[in-house]
Amino acid sequence: MMKPNFLILGAAKCGTTSLYYYLKQHPQVCMADPKEPRFFEMEYAQGMESYWQTYFASVWEGQPAIGEAAPRNLYLPYVGPRIKAEIPDAKLIVILRNPIERAFSHWWMTYSLGVEKLSFDEAMVANWEQLRDGVNFEGEAGEALWREAIHWGGAYRTVKYRWYLDMGYYAQQLERYLGLFDQSQIKILFTADLRKRTQAVLDEVCAFLGVETGFTQVDTTHQMVGLPQNAVPLLRLAQLTRTHYLIPQSFRAKIVALFNRYSRKPQMNAVTRVWLIEHYAPHNRALERLTGRDLSHWNK
């Protein structure tokens, strides 16, 4: 049975989409289509053959490196054991970003889509209260609760639970995977490096995957885009009626990028930022111990 041999686990809003598109251009790499398979997250009962046929069979042309990029896999506790059971020798890539920036970007995306109704400050409070109440996605009931939390349904999904804060608990998430896989199977990257040293980081990733390095033809102009609330009415109507797939992707991307560039993004409240710095400080220190990376600038 054919299987992928590497996975970009996350974290969400940290550059997984950019890394996916960069690797997709490599002649020795096959990336899943679409980018974010839901298999380990919520289709596991369908079996590995279904996983391959749904996400890889139509795009694989014999490339030695076969991968996917579902950024919730890092966050969800029940996913790691599933990956270990099915692809124990998989190479795992993690890319991380300042958790405050990640949380704000995550909130802005869901708010812009009209899914999140609360302001950033209000959403952080709601998320913190949820965590204090002990809501998590661990154990055998994790998938069922996750399904309830996300309410799949495009524009009609509602926010019952939030995970802006705890998606930034990177050390906790990494420790789960380090308890399942050998450290040599896990490659940890940082978003800032991918932005500043794109080619060098890509060479590191290619070496990790065992494919040719120095692939300089890669187009590194890709940028992730969302759909702001003041987007073209046609796109909003298409989203609400679930007919957005009828609009060519290239056209959608250009329009959305244009409006993202000129839409006014809100500023984070200074008091909230200070609270988040204090909140994440112990998590960041734990990540420093795991990675040997100085992350003190995240705590300023």
Image: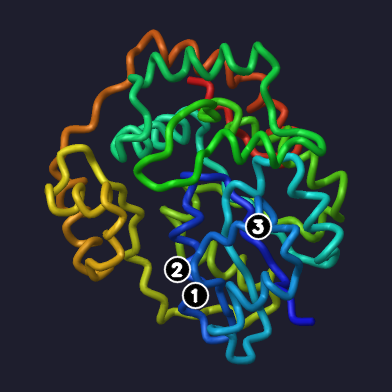
Quote the CA–CA distance across marks 1 and 2. Answer: 5 Å
Per the image, the residue denoted by label 2 is 21
Q: Is 45 in front, or is 169?
A: 45
Quote the CA–CA distance across marks 3 and 2. Answer: 14 Å
User: Quadrant location of residue 49?
Assistant: bottom right
Q: Could you say whether the residue bearing mark 1 is in a helix, strand or loop?
A: helix
**178 shown above or below 133:** below
Per the image, the residue denoted by label 1 is 24
**81 shown above or below 200:** above
Do callouts 1 and 2 mark residues in contact (Cβ within 8 Å)?
yes
Residue farthest to the bottom, as pictured? 62
Per the image, the residue denoted by label 3 is 93
Provide residue 70's location: percent of width, then percent of height: 58, 56
Left or right of 220 on screen, residue 292: right
User: Quadrant location of residue 181?
Assistant: bottom right
Left or right of 158 on screen, residue 76: right
Q: Tell me the quarter of the image containing the N terminus.
A: bottom right
Q: Could you say whether the residue bearing mark 2 is in a helix, strand or loop?
A: helix
**142 shown above or below 271:** below
- The 10 Å Cα crowd at callout 1, few under 14, some 14 to 19, many 20 or more, is some
**Residue type of the residue flagged with mark 3:** Ile
Left or right of 249 on screen, residue 44: right
Q: Could you say whether the residue bearing mark 3 is in a helix, strand or loop?
A: strand
Q: Is 69 in front, or is 245?
A: 245
**Residue type of the residue flagged with mark 1:** Lys
Left or right of 116 on screen, residue 202: right
Disc on the earlier residue, 1 or 3: 1
